[in-house]
Amino acid sequence: MRAFYLESYGCQMNLADSELIAGVLSGCGYRPTDAAEDADVILLNTCAIREHAEQRVAQRVRQLIAARGYREGVKIGLAGCMAQHHREKLLSMVPGLDFVVGPDGYRRLGELLEAEAPTADVQLDRDETYEGLLPARADGVRAWLTIMRGCNRFCTFCVVPYVRGRERSLPADVLIEELETIAASGYREVVLLGQTVNAYRHDGVDFGELLRRCAAVDGIERVRFTSPHPADMTDSAIEAMGDCPEVCPYIHLPLQSGSDTILEAMDRGHTVSEYRELVSRLRDAVPGMSFSTDIIVGYPGETEEDFEATSSMMDEIDYDHAFLFKYSAREGTRAYKVAETVSEKEKGRRLQRLIEEQEHRSLASNHRTLGLPTEVLVEGPAKRQNGWMSGKNPQFKTVVFEPTDAGPGDLVRVEVSSATSHTLVGRQTGL
Ligand code: SAH
Ligand code: SF4
Ligand code: F3S
């Protein structure tokens, strides 16, 4: 049996797509392998969000091509967002590359692999939802379920709408049926995925309604979702979060900037005070609500004052976690045409400031849980502490605890006895 080797980069949407790709390749008679040197097909599922993401892949694929040497018939390809970003140009940019496939081309992977000459399949397709394709999901307690693809927002800095195409949602009945299969396969938690996941809408079912229907699926103990867009957050979704105990009290709500001038320049579709109001509605509706965010520093025109506004807004919201990025100009986006005003060095300084502030904030937040019980969905052995177990609590914090009889998939109560800025440590006190 021929084998494929797959490496994945980028966001969870992309990781979920890798499961789809693995499913398609299995259907074509390939088996997965962890060793690139044994594979007949080597595939990197790539990200284009920042220049750095592309540079890493460019290096890695050249390395894999060099390692392949003269092995007969081994094909190497690039899939995903970077593939879509550069399209067929990649075939000449990377000598030795055999194929390029964009996010809407995975159904045709089999044919692509049969092609004699280097080929690109980079047609975006506004109807492709991959309905009916079976992803090869990774084992574990948590499964991903892509409920919508693409993005219509065109934030000025972002390449996603160009590489993933327009927004499209899957039918709710199809999703619920898939979730029932997911539950029957032993998963206990589902993460609903989409670039603007809360913009989900199909045949009159909105995101709030879908949350309720997912929460009602037998065997699914926890429902999460990512990434919601602040401007797409409706009362219906907030009420569903408040009403359904299965929907976790945690939301990743990208802020990008705490300055109205910059939010406006980014065309994010909301102001700082609207975001603040949304956070307070969520806090009122959902007990124990926890927040994380994405921030970009050094967007063109970001002054020291704008930056300070971001820093104080992060303090005010009191995020438990933040993904912090330096602005990276992406060809094809609206902001690409705008001259940069913040030097790399200054971006680095601003980033470092926010990283340090967030570390303190995360630590303080974790310290507030000391002595308190928290519910953990057990995933498996802890990575660092030998023999200990690890899982996530509802707020998506990693919790490690002394070994008990509890195994993967069990929900247990753990009392927190110590904490770092990234991990809670404790002892199981109940089931
Ligand atoms: N759909 C999500 C974000 C997806 S991209 C949303 O709208 O919230 C993930 C994060 O990458 C973004 O939230 C943003 O913070 C960051 N990002 C996107 N484009 C970027 C760029 N050109 N430079 C730096 N960071 C960027
Ligand atoms: Fe990019 Fe904005 Fe769409 Fe998010 S909402 S994927 S940041 S364009
Ligand atoms: Fe990257 Fe594509 Fe996701 S650009 S962040 S992998 S949608």
Image: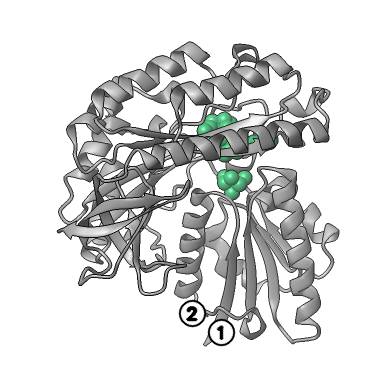
Q: Quadrant of ligand 1?
A: top right
Residue at the location (50% across, 25% down)? Answer: 315
Between 70 and 138, the one lying in front of the other is 138
Residue 63 makes an appearance in the image = yes
The answer as to whether callout 2 falls within 8 Å of ligand 3 is no
Question: x, y (%) of residue 250?
Answer: 35, 38
Q: x, y (%) of residue 148?
A: 42, 41
User: Marks 2/1: CA distance?
Assistant: 7 Å
Residue 29: mark: 2
Query: Which x, y percent locates residue 372?
Result: 25, 44
Tell whether 118 sits left or right of 84: right
Residue type at mark 2 is: Gly
Amino acid type, label 1? Arg
Q: Is residue 58 above or below residue 300?
A: below
- Residue in the image at 64% along x and 78% along y: 36
Colour scheme shown: one colour
Circle 1 crowding by C-alpha within 10 Å: few under 14, some 14–19, many from 20: some
Q: Dot 2, how many residues are within 10 Å of its Cα: few (below 14), some (14-19), or many (20+)? A: few
Residue at 51% over, 71% down: 25
Total count of labels: 2
Would residue 268 be seen by someone viewing this image from the given angle? no
Compared with residue 372, is residue 257 higher up or lower down, i.e. above or below? above
How far across and down, in percent of the image, does residue 171 sit? 32, 42
Which mark is drawn over residue 387? Answer: none
Q: What element carries label 2?
A: loop
N-terminal of the pair, mark 2 or mark 1, is 1
- Label 1: element kind: strand
Q: Going 42% across and 24% down the picture, which residue do you hit?
A: 232
Q: Contact (CB < 8 A) between labels 2 and 1? A: yes
Badge number at residue 2: 1
Nearer to the camera, 96 or 56: 56
